[in-house]
Structures are given as structure tokens and as C-alpha cells.
Image (cartoon, helix red, strand yellow):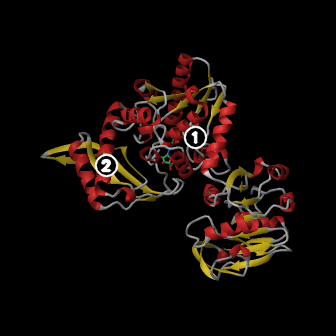
């Protein structure tokens, strides 16, 4: 299989680069720069390497550098932003820092005649975000694009197949970014685009059939698309040896537990054990207010419940989980800052009494999981379910989680969901919408009486990949109906607000 290495120097958009590459049906994997050597790169037979951006300046002693031997591997390299400056630095060029050269946002790019820019007009818009720039291209390189501020917006060394772009081709604001990556992958690296979901499913099924033959595997089924797809894949591989366990932690949305149980039993045909563990989780969460603390408690309790189930079943070899690639990277396995620990990765306790953890979707992005689900025959209603965090409503109740707060939040969330569905067409809905119960109380008036109730925040976001997200401009009518209904129908709520924060700088969830 052809694959591209994304060498991570700490940029925030590294996953986006991987996704963009995979959109061209070329497999890409992200590795932190300090976790792979040039020798290992050669042995892995990568078709090409992309150096990511990063927040540093190459002359800063603390900045991430890389062994220049990589430049002589005869593998094409494309450096993006910091990655471009690093190639210039490693190959003997010069990088300077000047406020006058700094560019942030959309910028006009002028390109020269070059195969990296095949099919791209001489002038187009690119996305810039830098102060440092390549002030002297290394010997063997030529400048192949400029902007009005940046004397080297792109450079290339034909002979060694080394390239750098100062702008970000991976973001959609760069008009021809997709085409530039396509040129790099196909014309320069010689890829053919052999990465297909059907093949991936086949490979994984064959792999697990062999690795898990005769072994019992427990799958943590949450009802979300990830665990359902993981379940389907493993079911194909090991059939009856897969036992799905659905832990109802009491932090699910209104009627969700029953819906999940019915749909998955009926539609997926898998054996499913439902464990109603709500009381246990609430007890453990008592007095816990710190968001990471809640995630840890829930992650740990989840594993304990599983261990107990496994004990009852006997001879369980492995625990399977629907962990996907963004969970792995956002939890700090890559080189970017830890944003929050997703409970199925960062919150795992140190000692887990299974021989192995099986995570068949660990390499996949959300949209890839969905297309894998479709290729495996997962019903559309499950494929397109909006994501729901593993720690459930616990991260949507700000502060301590109590039964009363959960009851209020469940009702508010159900009302908001109903109004979004009633007021919009199926293809035009936000990608995720939900209510949050804040810990702010405010004064209100109802009839002639003063009230002092909770403030509910409504959140709706539009996104491709949940790595970045725009707050959704919902029609006022939907917000008005939802707001009225929530304050009128749900005792204990005196105010409703709408969250207008995009990601970044906010995250989708409040905690
Ligand atoms: P954030 O809040 O990180 O959310 O911007 C991005 C997406 O991930 C979901 N999310 C989680 N999913 N376990 C999960 O399985 C978690 O701990 C978790 N936290 C957030 C969130 O709903 C959004 O879709």
C-alpha cells in the first residue's frame, strides 16, 4: 500500500494534512518528528514526506529540528510553513524574521511555471500565517512562488525532489490547495491512489480473523457510529466470539439507552449485554467538578464495569474500543499540545486486566469511519448519528453532576433537538447540536413570581471533521421556539443563551 509520512513538528493542522492526503485515496500517517529516524523512514517505504507547520522559529534552540540525512533519502518532501523554513535551514539556506514580511490570512499568491502548480492560475488566493520566511533559498533550490510580502512563498529542488510552501495548502481558504497536494502526491511522489475503504475493511477483517482466532473479545458499544462500525468489523472477523457490552452509565440523553439497545440488537444482530450502571457512576462523580477529573472517573469506572462483565463471561482475551484517529492525536500521542483527554484513550487507568486492547478504527478519521460503516452495510440512521462524547452528559453539566441537573439537561436537550429537526431540512442540519447546563443561576420572572434557576446554553456547530468547527447560524425562529419551550416547560431553568464560539478558539464540548 502506498503511504505518505506526515512528520509532525507541532502544527495545529496536522490532522487536516493527513485527511487531505487521504481524500486523494493515498494513505497518510502522522508521526512525531522525534519518534522516527531517517532509517526507519526508508524501511517503511514511504512514497513521500510532508513536514508540517509548527509554532517555532528554526533558530530558536528549543525548536524541533530533524536529521538532514532525510534530505538524501531520495523520497520527495514537501514542507509546509515551518516545515518549509526547516528544509531551507537544513539545506543551507537562510530564514529571517521580520514584521514587514509577516502575513496572516488570505493573501494573493503568484506562482511560476512548475509541476507543483499544474492546473493553477498564475494568481490565486492562499492562506498564510507566519512572521519568519525563507530569505535565501538553499543551493539547488529555486523560488517558484511569491506574494507581495514574501519573496519566497514556495521553493523547489527538482533534482532531489524537495519542495516547500510558506502557505497552508491543507486549509480550504487556499483556493487551489487541494490541487497542489494532488500534484505533489501523484506527479511528484508517483502515487496512484490505491487507498480504498472496501480494501481497508477486507484487510482489517483478515487481520483480526487471524490474530483473534478462537479468542473472546468484548466490545464497548456506546451506540455511536464509531463503536458500531468497530463492532460490525469485528463481528465479520470473529463472529460469535465478539460480545458487545453496552454500559448505560446513566449519562445518556433522553430515551437513548433504550434506542441504542433496540437499534443495535435489531439492526446489527450482535449479541449485546446491557449493563445499567447509572447509580455507580453518579456516586463516583459526587463532588467531582474538574472536567478532566470527571473524564478520568468515568473512564476508570467504565473499565471496571467491563472487567466485571468479562469476569462473568470468563476467558476474555481482549477489550475492543471504537477509538478513532483524532482521539489518539488530541490526547497527546502526537506532537501537538494536549487539548483534552478523550475518555477512551487518555482516561484509561494504568492497569487494565485484559491481555490486549483492540482498536480497529485507530487510524481513521470520522468521515472515513462513516464510509467504512456504509461499506459494511451499517444502516444510514446509525452512520449519520451525530457524535456524542464517551463521558456523556457529564461533560455537558458544568460543575458537579447530580440527578437533578441531568434531568433538567436531558429535557432541555430533547426540546432543542426536536426544534432543530422540526425547523430544518435533513441535509441542512448542523453537524452537532445539543444543550449544556451551565452552573450559572440567574434571576427571572414567571407570572408574578421571582425565579432563580439555571442557565441553559444551546450549542450547534457545522464542521467536516470536528477538528475545527463553525458555530451554526441557526434561524432565529428555531432558537426562539427552543428558548420559549425550555423556559416554559422545564422547571428549574430561567434563562437560555446561544453559544457563538467557533473551534478554535473554543472546543465543541464545554468541558
Ligand atoms: P471537542 O470538544 O474536543 O469535541 O472539540 C470534538 C468532538 O469530539 C466529541 N468528544 C468526545 N468524544 N469522548 C468521545 O468519544 C470524549 O471524551 C469526547 N469529548 C468530545 C465531541 O462531542 C465532538 O463531536
- Which type of secondary structure does the marked residue at label 1 adopt? loop
- Count residues near mark 2 (Cα–Cα under 10 Å), then give few for <14, some for 14-19, many for 20+: many
Where's residue 438, x and y in %? Answer: 37, 44
At a point 52% along the width and 21% down the height, the residue shown is: 309
- Tell me the quarter of the picture where residue 6 sits: bottom right
Residue furthest to the left in view is 448
- Residue located 33% across and 39% down the image: 410
Confirm whether residue 71 shows in the render: yes
Q: Quadrant of residue 67?
A: bottom right
Q: Nearer the viewer, residue 434 or 243?
A: 243
Determine whether, in the image, residue 286 is placed left or right of residue 35: left
* Mark 2 residue's CB less than 8 Å from ligand 1: no
Q: Tell me which label, 2 or 1, sits earlier in the chain.
A: 1
Residue 382 lies, with reference to residue 188, above or below; the image says above
For disc 2, the marked residue is: 416
Please say whether residue 443 is visible from this viewpoint. no
Residue topped by disc 1: 323
The tag on residue 64 is none
Q: CA distance from mark 2 to mark 1?
A: 28 Å
State the residue in front, 368 or 60: 368
Q: In the image, is 359 to the left or to the right of 400?
A: right
Instruction: Give coordinates of residue 223: x percent, y percent.
Output: 45, 37
Residue 188 relative to residue 245: left or right: right
Residue 303 in the image: above or below residue 484: above
Q: Is residue 314 above or below residue 100?
A: above
**Disc number lying in front (2 or 1):** 1
Amino acid at each position: 500500500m502506498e503511504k505518505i509520512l506526515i512528520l509532525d513538528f507541532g502544527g495545529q493542522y496536522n490532522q487536516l494534512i493527513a485527511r487531505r492526503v487521504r481524500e486523494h485515496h493515498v494513505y497518510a500517517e502522522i508521526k512525531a518528528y522525534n519518534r522516527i529516524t531517517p532509517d526507519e523512514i526508508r524501511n517503511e517505504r514511504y512514497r513521500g514526506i510532508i513536514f508540517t507547520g509548527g509554532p517555532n522559529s528554526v533558530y530558536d534552540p528549543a525548536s524541533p529540528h530533524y536529521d538532514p540525512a532525510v534530505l538524501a533519502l531520495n523520497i520527495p518532501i514537501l514542507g509546509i510553513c515551518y516545515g518549509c523554513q526547516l528544509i531551507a535551514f537544513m539545506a543551507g539556506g537562510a530564514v529571517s524574521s521580520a514584521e514587514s514580511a509577516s502575513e496572516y490570512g488570505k493573501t494573493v499568491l503568484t506562482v511560476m511555471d512548475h509541476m507543483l502548480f499544474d492546473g493553477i492560475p498564475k494568481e490565486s488566493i492562499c492562506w498564510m500565517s507566519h512572521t519568519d520566511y525563507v530569505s535565501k533559498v538553499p543551493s539547488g533550490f529555486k523560488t517558484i512562488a511569491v506574494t507581495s510580502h514574501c519573496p519566497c512563498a514556495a521553493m523547489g529542488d527538482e533534482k532531489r525532489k524537495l519542495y516547500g510552501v510558506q502557505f497552508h495548502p491543507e486549509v480550504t481558504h487556499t483556493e487551489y490547495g487541494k490541487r497542489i497536494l494532488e500534484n505533489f502526491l501523484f506527479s511528484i511522489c508517483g502515487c496512484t491512489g490505491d487507498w480504498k475503504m472496501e480494501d481497508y475493511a477486507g484487510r482489517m477483517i483478515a487481520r483480526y480473523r487471524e490474530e483473534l482466532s478462537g479468542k473472546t473479545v468484548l466490545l464497548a458499544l456506546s451506540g455511536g457510529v464509531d463503536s458500531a462500525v468497530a463492532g460490525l468489523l469485528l463481528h465479520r472477523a470473529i463472529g460469535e466470539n465478539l460480545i458487545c457490552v453496552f454500559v448505560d452509565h446513566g449519562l445518556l440523553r433522553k430515551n437513548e439507552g433504550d434506542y441504542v439497545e433496540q437499534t443495535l440488537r435489531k439492526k446489527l444482530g450482535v449479541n449485546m449485554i446491557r449493563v445499567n450502571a447509572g447509580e455507580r457512576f453518579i456516586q463516583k462523580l459526587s463532588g467531582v467538578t474538574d472536567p478532566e477529573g470527571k473524564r478520568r472517573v468515568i473512564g476508570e469506572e467504565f473499565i471496571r464495569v467491563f472487567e466485571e462483565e468479562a469476569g462473568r463471561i470468563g476467558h476474555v482475551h481482549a477489550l475492543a474500543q471504537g477509538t478513532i484517529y483524532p482521539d489518539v492525536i488530541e490526547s497527546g500521542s502526537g506532537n501537538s499540545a494536549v487539548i483534552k483527554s478523550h475518555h477512551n484513550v487518555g482516561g484509561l487507568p494504568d492497569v487494565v486486566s485484559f491481555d490486549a486492547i483492540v482498536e480497529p478504527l485507530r487510524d481513521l478519521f470520522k468521515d472515513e469511519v462513516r464510509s467504512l460503516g456504509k461499506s459494511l452495510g451499517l444502516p444510514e440512521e446509525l452512520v449519520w448519528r451525530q457524535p456524542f462524547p464517551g463521558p456523556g452528559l457529564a461533560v455537558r453539566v458544568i460543575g458537579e453532576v447530580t440527578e437533578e441537573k441531568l434531568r433538567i439537561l436531558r429535557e432541555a436537550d430533547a426540546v432543542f433537538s426536536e426544534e432543530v429537526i422540526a425547523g430544518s431540512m435533513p441535509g441542512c442540519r448542523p453537524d452537532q447540536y445539543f444543550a449544556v447546563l451551565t452552573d450559572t443561576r440567574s434571576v427571572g420572572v414567571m407570572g408574578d413570581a421571582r425565579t432563580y434557576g439555571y442557565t441553559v446554553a444551546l450549542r450547534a456547530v457545522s464542521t467536516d471533521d470536528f477538528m475545527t468547527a463553525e458555530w451554526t447560524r441557526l434561524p432565529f425562529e428555531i432558537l426562539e421556539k427552543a428558548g420559549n419551550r425550555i423556559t416554559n416547560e422545564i422547571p428549574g431553568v430561567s434563562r437560555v443563551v446561544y453559544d457563538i464560539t467557533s473551534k478554535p478558539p473554543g472546543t465543541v464540548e464545554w468541558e
